[in-house]
Image: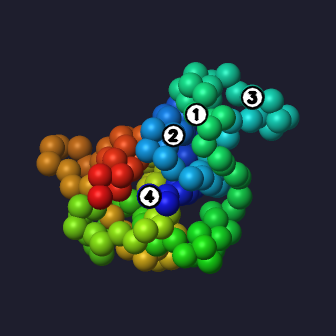
């Protein structure tokens, strides 16, 4: 699997750290942190203890960079990645019915607001994880786990 993750404007350092752990476990090639998404380093370039607490060292094994979300998407498109926004929308498809290519870039959105429409419009496909219960969505880290393990099981 050739897979990268794009994380625009994620609020929680613990969600991002957890995604790093799952990314390490599933062989993700790179994580793009965009906007105000917390990175493993603070603004002074020091390692963040709170990040390490949830990533447990995965921040050392999964390559990452910080860049503008539109630049990250362009870089992935130029690299031949299928851009998959994981979001609920009127045009989304159930994640397990999509034909994925060999190279996939997964975009996960903000914990409250999701992925903005202008970013969803840049995706090749919008994948939705169906909800059966009363809640409308999963935690971003759980969504990442569902998608990454689905991709590794293909």
Please tell me which residue is depicted at 74% across the width and 35% down the height of the picture: 41
Q: Which residue is mark 3?
A: 47
In the displayed structure, 123 sits above or below 17; it is: below
* Disc with the residue nearer the chain's start (3 vs 2): 2
Of badges 3 and 4, the one in the foreground is 4
* Disc with the residue nearer the chain's start (1 vs 3): 3
In the displayed structure, 121 sits above or below 136; it is: below
Residue 109 percent location from the top left of the image: 47, 54
Of badges 4 and 1, the one in the foreground is 4
Q: Please say whether residue 70 is visible from this viewpoint.
A: no
Please tell me which residue is depicted at 21% across the width and 55% down the height of the picture: 130
- Among the 4 quarters of the image, the one containing residue 124: bottom left
**Cα distance between the residues tagged 1 and 3:** 13 Å
Task: Tell me, for residue 103, which label it has, or none.
Answer: none
Of badges 2 and 4, the one in the foreground is 4
* Disc with the residue nearer the chain's start (2 vs 4): 4
**Cα distance between the residues tagged 4 and 1:** 18 Å
Q: Which residue is mark 1?
A: 58
- Report whether 58 appears left or right of 150: right
Q: Which residue is mark 2?
A: 24
Q: Disc 1, disc 3: CB below 8 Å? A: no
Residue 151 percent location from the top left of the image: 35, 56
Q: Which residue is mark 4?
A: 1
Residue 127 percent location from the top left of the image: 33, 64
Please tell me how crowded label 2 is: few (under 14), some (14-19), or many (20+) other residues with Cα within 10 Å: many
**Cα distance between the residues tagged 3 and 4:** 29 Å
- Report whether 41 appears left or right of 138: right
């Amino acid at each position: 699997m050739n897979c990268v993750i794009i994380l625009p404007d994620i609020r929680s350092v613990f969600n991002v750290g957890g995604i790093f752990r799952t990314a390490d476990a599933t062989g993700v090639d790179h994580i793009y942190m965009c906007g105000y998404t917390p990175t493993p380093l603070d603004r002074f370039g020091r390692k963040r203890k709170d990040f390490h607490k949830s990533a447990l060292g995965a921040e050392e094994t999964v390559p990452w960079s910080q860049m503008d979300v539109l630049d990250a998407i362009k870089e992935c498109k130029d690299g031949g990645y299928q851009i998959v926004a994981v979001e609920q929308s009127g045009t989304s498809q159930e994640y397990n019915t999509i034909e994925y290519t060999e190279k996939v870039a997964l975009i996960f959105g903000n914990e409250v607001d999701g992925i903005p429409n202008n970013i969803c419009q840049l995706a090749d496909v919008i994948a939705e994880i169906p909800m059966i219960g009363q809640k409308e969505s999963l935690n971003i880290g759980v969504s990442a786990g569902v998608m990454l393990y689905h991709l590794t099981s293909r």
